[in-house]
Image: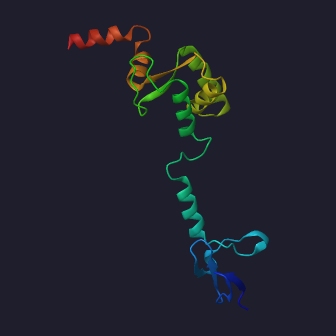
Amino acid sequence: MPRKGYRKGYLYQEPPGQRYCVFHKALHPLEEFPPGSGGKPSSWCRLAYTEYRRKEREGVPRAHGSQAYRRIKVLQGYGAKCAACGNTDPLVLQLDHVDPELARQQKALCKERGRKFSTFAYEDAIARNYPDTYQILCSNCNSRKRLDVGGRAEWYAEMLKKE
C-alpha cells in the first residue's frame, strides 16, 4: 500500500517503490534511501547525503584533528616564518627539532608505540604551547641543518672543488 506523506503543504500518496527526497524535492526509487531510525527509510536519498557532506567540507581541512589542521596550528604558533632565512612560503615550512638527540628519542618512542612521528611532533608542540625545543625551518634550511652535522658542509665543498 502506498505511504501517505506530507509534501509542499498537501497530503499525497507516494507511488509504490518510490519515495520523496526532501533534499532534492523529487521522487527516487526506494533502494536509494538508506535505513533511517526505526528501520524506516530515511527522508534523504544517499546522493543527497553525499552532496550535503561535500558542500559542508569545501575549503575546510578534513577534520579538526587532521594533520593539515595540526600543521596550520603549529605554523601559526611559531609565526609561519623560517627561523634561519625568513622564508614565509607555507608549502615549504617544516617543524624542526632544535636538538637532534631529542628528535632521535621521539622517533624511537613513536616506533615503539606505532605512531606517525610528524603527528606526534605536531601534537607535542601544540600540547606544550609551542616550546623552544622546536622551530620552523624551510625545507632548504632544514636539509642544510641535517647535512651540516659533523662538518659535512666542508666535505661537500671540498668534493665539489676536486671535480
Position in image of residue 12 (x %, y %): 68, 88
* Residue drawn at 64 percent across, 86 percent down: 17
Q: Nearer the viewer, residue 93 or 24?
A: 24
Position in image of residue 121 (x %, y %): 59, 27
Q: Is residue 139 left or right of residue 12?
A: left
Residue furthest left in the image: 163
Residue furthest right in the image: 38
* Residue drawn at 63 percent across, 23 percent down: 129
* Residue drawn at 40 percent across, 20 percent down: 86
> Which quarter of the picture shows residue 20?
bottom right
Q: Nearer the viewer, residue 7 or 40?
A: 7
In the image, is residue 52 above or below residue 59? below
Residue furthest front in the image: 9
Q: Nearer the viewer, residue 154 or 136?
A: 136
In the image, is residue 148 above or below residue 28? above
Display colour scheme: rainbow
> Which quarter of the picture shows residue 111?
top right
> Which quarter of the picture shows residue 73?
top right
Q: Is residue 49 left or right of residue 11?
A: left
Q: Is residue 15 left or right of residue 95?
A: right
Position in image of residue 50 (x %, y %): 56, 63
Q: Is residue 64 left or right of residue 142?
A: right
Tell me the quadrant of the picture where the C terminus can be found.
Answer: top left
Number of marks in the image? 0
Position in image of residue 89 (x %, y %): 39, 30
Tell me the quadrant of the picture where the N terminus can be found.
Answer: bottom right
